[in-house]
Image: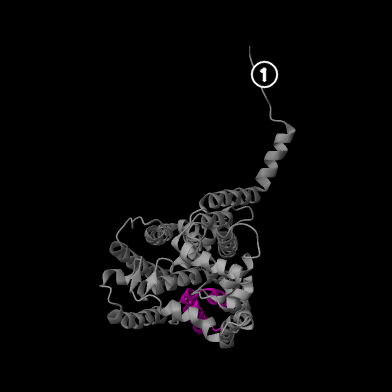
């Protein structure tokens, strides 16, 4: 018996047309659901940091009246994050779920910021999926997933405000740029890695007043006022900064940088390493400040990326999470320079290789000394590539780059 032909019905046509017309929305929703499902599956892991620090701190706050407990809590985390821990004590659900939910929320906010920045910089066609792909890729970076959902850490929060600051910089909203950066610095001292970029842009571009930098300490002070009102002594409020600077007396902890190649003699190398770091940054920016160097907004992203990598490579006492912001910024870099796809993947692998021993007691997959050499080579390549692209870049190249995403 011959089956009759089944033609597509009118409803199906309308449905397909609707999907095609709203493909960006459907893609965004599907990726969001998949990212949430994956995080829900991984959130049950309890890291050492959670067991010995985050949970005891949260339990202490809950036992001492939530926000009222901040006064007497001993912690090496900054006040804004302790406000969050105090706030979640008033919410239902387990401490583990609440702590990780905070990081997960910021995962998605950060991914949205990446999507917006990519869209602004590459200016794709109206129906392009490229910004949504940037959103998706951000949510599935291995270290981003491991950092918050598995480990329970909060590096995504300060990174989120760095990304917000970058976006506001691109929008030329300079006061809000420094307010956002001030919030990032209030959450984590590692945000200071990008401060040299703002100083460089001030000196090179001459587009905003130096007074804008005052917003950084003003915002920090405002964010610390609640802790002071609650009775926290000022010295203890600022203790986390000092603890983060001098807490570890090792040249490097579970990370691949310059000090992976040296004996772990902190007293001998640490001060010299600090001077070396400042010198390297000054040499890098001296190259960029040259008058014949033309810098556009896309170059800003590369400069942010290189600066974070230089700090994490040359500063002593770095450990596995200190290059976290580079993991996220490298997503933007990937979509600006798709022919340099290997660069973000190497950055992600350098950090992923460092995460495994800390979280799971496994690895590293490749010895830190080998990865340190690879890391250094990547920095050299990024600086060389940046300089090559900026010096007398022809307009035709810019036009061609823009058209490649249409």
State the extent of the magenta-drawn residues as a range. Answer: 181-207
Q: Position of residue 239 (x, y in %)?
A: 49, 81
Q: Is residue 19 left or right of residue 158?
A: right
Residue 190 located within the stretch drawn in magenta: yes
* Residue 391 is at least partly visible in this image: no
Q: Is 195 rendered above or below residue 54?
A: below
Among all residues in the image, which is located at the extreme front? Answer: 63
Q: Is residue 117 left or right of residue 52?
A: right
Q: Out of 18 and 221, give the one closest to the viewer.
A: 221
Q: Is 96 rendered above or below residue 15?
A: below
Among all residues in the image, which is located at the extreme top? Answer: 1
Q: Position of residue 302 (x, y in %)?
A: 46, 69
Q: Is residue 399 left or right of residue 285?
A: right
Q: Is 148 rendered above or below residue 77?
A: above
Residue at 58% over, 74% down: 80
Q: Secondary structure at mark 1?
A: loop
Quadrant location of residue 272? Answer: bottom left
Quadrant location of residue 274? Answer: bottom left
Q: Out of 101 and 322, give the one closest to the viewer.
A: 101
Residue 104 located within the stretch drawn in magenta: no
Number of numbered discs visible in the structure rendering: 1
Q: Is residue 136 left or right of residue 350?
A: right
Among all residues in the image, which is located at the extreme right? Answer: 10
Q: Crowding near pointer 1: few (<14 within 10 Å), some, many (20+)?
A: few
Q: Main secondary structure of the magenta part?
A: helix
Q: Position of residue 143 (x, y in %)?
A: 46, 59
| Residue indicated by mark 1 | 4
Image quadrant containing the N terminus: top right
Quadrant location of residue 368? Answer: bottom left
Image quadrant containing the C terminus: bottom right
* Residue 159 is at least partly visible in this image: yes
């Amino acid at each position: 018996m011959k089956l009759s032909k089944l033609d597509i019905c009118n409803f199906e046509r309308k449905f397909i047309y609707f999907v095609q017309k709203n493909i960006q929305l459907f893609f965004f929703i599907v990726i969001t659901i998949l990212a949430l499902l994956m995080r829900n599956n991984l959130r049950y892991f309890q890291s050492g940091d959670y067991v010995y620090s985050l949970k005891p701190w949260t339990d202490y706050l809950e036992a001492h009246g939530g926000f009222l407990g901040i006064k007497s809590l001993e912690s090496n985390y900054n006040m804004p994050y302790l406000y969050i821990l105090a706030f979640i004590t008033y919410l239902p659900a387990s401490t583990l779920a609440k702590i990780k939910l905070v990081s997960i929320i910021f995962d998605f906010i950060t991914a949205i910021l990446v999507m917006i920045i990519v869209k602004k910089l590459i200016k794709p066609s109206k129906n392009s999926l490229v910004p949504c792909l940037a959103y998706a890729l951000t949510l599935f970076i291995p270290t981003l997933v491991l950092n918050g959902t598995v480990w329970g850490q909060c590096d995504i929060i300060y990174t989120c405000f760095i990304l917000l600051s970058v976006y506001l910089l691109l929008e030329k909203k300079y006061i809000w740029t420094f307010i956002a950066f001030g919030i990032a610095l209030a959450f984590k001292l590692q945000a200071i890695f990008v401060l040299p970029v703002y100083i460089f842009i001030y000196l090179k571009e001459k587009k905003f007043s130096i007074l804008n930098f005052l917003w950084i300490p003003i915002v920090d002070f405002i964010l610390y006022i609640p802790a002071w009102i609650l009775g926290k002594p000022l010295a203890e409020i600022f203790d986390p900064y000092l603890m983060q600077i001098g807490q570890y007396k090792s040249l490097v902890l579970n990370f691949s940088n310059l000090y992976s190649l040296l004996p772990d003699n902190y007293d001998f190398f640490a001060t010299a390493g600090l001077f070396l770091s400042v010198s390297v940054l000054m040499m890098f920016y001296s190259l960029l400040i040259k008058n014949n160097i033309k810098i556009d907004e896309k170059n800003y992203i590369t400069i942010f990326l290189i600066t974070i990598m230089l700090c994490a490579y040359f500063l002593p006492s770095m450990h596995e999470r200190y290059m976290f912001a580079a993991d996220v910024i490298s997503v933007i870099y990937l979509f600006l320079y798709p022919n340099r796809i290997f660069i973000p993947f190497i950055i992600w692998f350098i950090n992923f290789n460092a995460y495994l021993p800390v979280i799971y007691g496994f690895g590293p997959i490749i010895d830190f000394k080998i990865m340190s050499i690879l890391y250094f080579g990547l920095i050299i390549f990024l600086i060389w590539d940046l300089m090559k692209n900026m010096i007398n870049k022809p307009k035709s190249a810019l036009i061609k780059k823009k058209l490649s995403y249409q």
